[in-house]
Image: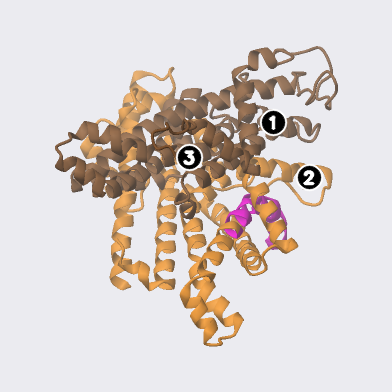
Chain colours: A brown, B orange
Amino acid sequence: MTDLTQSPLPEPSALSRGLRVLAGNRTGMIGFVLVALIIGSAIFAPWIVPYDPAAIMVGPRMAPPSAEHWLGTDNIGRDIFSRVIAGGRIAMLVAAASLTAALSAGLLLGLIAGLGPRWLDNVLLLVFDALRSFPTIVFGLAVVTIIGPSLFTVMLVVAITSIPIYARIVRTQTMALKNAEFILAERAMGVGMPRLLFIHVLPNVLGPLLILASMDVPLVIATEAGLSFLGMGVRPPTPSWGVILNDGYNFIRNSPWPVIGGSIPIILVTLGFTFLGEALRDIFDPKLRKAG
Amino acid sequence: MLLYAFQRFGLSVVIVMVAVSILTLMLHVVPGDPAVMILGPRATPELIEQTRVAMGLDRPLPVQIVTFFGNILRGDLGQDVFTGRSVSRIVFEQLPYTLILISVSILWAATLGIALGCYSALRRNTWLDTLTGVISVGTISIPAFVMALYSVLVFAVWLRWLPAIGAGEGFWDGIRHLILPSFAIGISWVGYVARIVRASMLEVMGQPHVRMARAYGLPDELITRSHILKIAVQPAVTLIGTGVAHLFSAAVFVEAIFARPGIGALIVQAVNERNYPIVLGAVLVTTGIIVLATLVSDLVIAWLDPRQREEL
């Protein structure tokens, strides 16, 4: 009956498999849609915005939402919806750049700590613990005092404060893998270190790392918006969500719309990435669930 | 237990020392002279030289770091650039405001969170369980400073129930001024704590020792209190212990938004003035408190669960 020579059905690719499982997970799907919307609007921001986000208009100031201005206008008549979309671009840029930097540095340092000599491991662990004991915003403010406020400062702060978290996870995973049987077997067969790292250790470490990174995006965005809110991050007139909120806060007794408009995207991004990250974690790595 | 506590304390001291070194190194690695940075571009060379000597910047780097450590041990964090007042005095004047704010926030949040998490684990799928789940997700997704803005908007601007500015004078007025800020900081912690307590309660409830206790016929309440909750509360303790850093970050925003005095407000003002001895001193003190909080939470866990003491 069964023809053993028949070629097996083509394996569905990891991506389509992941998407199919995601479709069965309601909150995961909501998260996926939100994230797609936000990344999409960040990429296509210049074509989406109905008005120039920095243009000061002769029209009404601090107007409530209307057909012309979906989220109203701010204290000098700028269109809040356009500013929010443009701010999303900044937020995503900061998240992408700083998380990439933190992931690469964390991966490297974690591998060194996990595979290197014992003393180096101890030194690195101490540095990680010390870095983690700075409150992000307070540390960020200290960095601002030294190198001044800018988009780059924000990215640097986020990267430095996230490195220890990733490095620690890579280290733990590497240490567990170091003595796994399949690694020992490979080593017994004379496989060199670089190959061992790239073919066997890296794929095992990368998955949990990327899931954690996606759950960290809200934190990064809150840090960027927060520092910009305090006037220590992205400087006006660049429309960061934090800058929009700060403008809104100064005129909170006159109109609630800038605060509402500026905070909606932050809440949506947080919901989206949290839902997506949790769904991915449950699908790909149930072991991590406990750690959360 | 004593040995464990001693080892953990030693480690904490080392961590703080490393943190201090990172900060000082950071200051010196960056190109540019701190003295010029403080005085601005229009300072005369004589003034710059004078400040450099006053700050000890003319001596070699290792000497500077060693002196810095020595001074810290004596409780001397340097002088305010503008007024010449002692930094440690300025910092410790502001610290109580922030400590009160974050302790009140975390206390009400943790109490409510543990109660909600406990209840929803014991009575799963009731309306309160569902509500707790919704509240958890809803509040976690709103950063503290956005929450603070909304509390100002709703309770101070629209409803006019509570004051939104300052710390108040006298005891009762102080409490009235504390309600909104501590609500803004605490609310997302209710969600975190409830979620984690619920999850770990459910896990512990399925373990053999709980079944065993039940088989012996111990009353439900006793089982919950001394066999389940004692273990299930541990992740929440760790969460709060490591979360003190987040509490300080949140306090920076809340103090700025509610115009309250405190260490966050102090740091923001000092950054604006580029008054870096104050920034450095305040960062050091907060870091010290955070390391201490982690230490305390580790010790609490070791006390709750003797199995944890052997690690390290």
Q: Is residue B189 magenta?
A: yes
Q: Which mark is residue A211?
A: 3
Residue A253 place in picture, x, y as percent: 79, 35
Q: Earlier in the sequence, mark 3 or mark 1?
A: 3
Q: Disc 1 marks which amino acid?
A: Gly
Residue A147, compared with residue B13, is above or below; it is above
Label 3 residue SS: helix
Please give the range of residues in magenta: B167-194
Residue carrying label 2? B154
Q: Residues within 10 Å of mark 1 (few under 14, many from 20)?
A: many
Q: Chain of mark 2?
A: B
Q: Nearer the viewer, residue B98 or A290?
A: A290
Q: Disc 3 marks which amino acid?
A: Ile
Residue B53 place in picture, x, y as percent: 29, 32
Q: Is residue B21 magenta?
A: no
Q: Are marks 1 and 2 in contact (CB under 8 Å)?
A: no
